[in-house]
Image: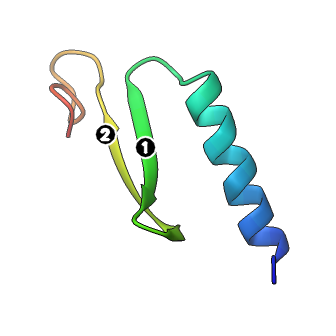
Amino acid sequence: MSTPARKRLMRDFKRLQQDPPAGISGAPHDNNITLWNAVIFGPDDTPWDGGE
């Protein structure tokens, strides 16, 4: 069964794969669409400097 939340997450994942924002990557963890792993690279001298 597919819930609206799962449909939204799948749509977001597809967009993230096709046109990722600069400095951001992410994917669902294993086969669980509700648990994600992500890396965010930001400008120098910010908390996201170097991919936190």
Residue at the spot 15% in from the left edge and 21% down from the top edge: 45
Q: Position of residue 7 (x, y in %)?
A: 79, 62
| Residue density around tag 2, few if under 14, some if 14–19, many if 20 or more, within 10 Å | some
**15 lies left or right of 34:** right
For this orientation, the residue located farthest to the bottom is 1
Q: Classify 11 as above or below 48.
A: below
Residue 44 got which mark? none
Q: Quadrant of the N terminus?
A: bottom right
Q: Give the residue at mark 1.
A: 26
**38 lies left or right of 51:** right
Q: Quadrant of residue 50?
A: top left
* Mark 2 and mark 1 residues within 8 Å of each other at the beta carbon: yes
**8 lies left or right of 43:** right
Which of pointers 2 and 1 lies earlier in the amino acid sequence?
A: 1
Q: Amino acid at mark 2?
A: Val
Q: Position of residue 40 (x, y in %)?
A: 33, 35
**41 lies left or right of 32:** left
Residue at the spot 81% in from the left edge and 76% down from the top edge: 2
Distance Cα–Cα, label 2 vs label 1: 6 Å
| Residue density around tag 1, few if under 14, some if 14–19, many if 20 or more, within 10 Å | some
Residue 39 got which mark? 2
Mark 2 residue element: strand
Residue at the spot 63% in from the left edge and 25% down from the top edge: 18
Q: Quadrant of residue 35?
A: bottom left
Q: Position of residue 42 (x, y in %)?
A: 30, 23
3 vs 45, nearest the viewer:
3
Q: Quadrant of the C terminus?
A: top left
Mark 1 residue element: strand
Q: Amino acid at mark 1?
A: Gly
9 vs 47, nearest the viewer:
9
Q: Position of residue 19 (x, y in %)?
A: 62, 21
